Image (cartoon, grey):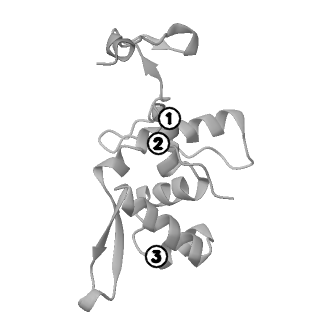
Amino acid sequence: MSRKRFLDTECPVARALDQVGDWWSLRIVLQAMYGTRRFVDFQQQLGIAKNILCDRLSRLVEHDVLRKEDVGEHGSRYEYRLTEKGRDLFTVVVALRQWGDKWIPTEFPPLDLRDRENGAPIQAVRVLAGDGRALDVRDVFTQVDERQNTGS
């Protein structure tokens, strides 16, 4: 049985999950954010099977989350680098990390992420109103685009 694809759905969350929604893909993206570049290093850091890693790296390259760069002679060595699209997942990864630290604690202390410019701890990821107020799910609503209703 094949996995359902969500590329044709109107839901942006489903479309995003179609590209980076399995846990290996996000772990690979996170590892790339830590500076991992080479196939062998991803495999070693994650403990992932070669075939699964090869598949996920190919998909992440196909979806422009990573780019594959030839850094060796005659195509003998490649590195995987985050694209702008991949770097834009930083907020998502930090939000997931903070959620996990809050709701699924472990014996290990939370990772202490700090601002490189001044050394200050980062704040919790929040959804903000235009005036800077923090919002939660009860504070927002979906505005229906009238063009959707008219078919234009």
| Residue drawn at 46 percent across, 66 percent down | 57
- Residue picked out by circle 2: 16
Q: Is residue 64 above or below residue 120?
A: below
Q: Which mark is residue 13?
A: 1
Q: Position of residue 130 (x, y in %)?
A: 33, 11
Q: Quadrant of residue 71?
A: bottom left
Q: Quadrant of residue 90?
A: top left
Q: Which mark is residue 98?
A: none
Residue 93 visible (yes or no): no
Q: Is residue 41 left or right of residue 106?
A: left
Q: Nearer the viewer, residue 67 or 46?
A: 67
- Per the model, the C-alpha gap separating discs 3 and 2 is 24 Å
- Residue picked out by circle 3: 39
Category of crowding for the residue at label 2, using alpha-carbon neighbours closer than 10 angstroms: few (below 14), some (14–19), many (at least 20): few
Residue 83 visible (yes or no): yes
SS state under label 2: helix
Q: Is residue 15 left or right of residue 131?
A: right
Q: Amino acid at mark 1?
A: Val
Q: Position of residue 151 (x, y in %)?
A: 34, 18
The tag earlier along the polypeptide, 3 or 2, is 2
Q: Amino acid at mark 3?
A: Phe
Q: Position of residue 13 (x, y in %)?
A: 50, 35
Q: Is residue 61 left or right of residue 2?
A: left
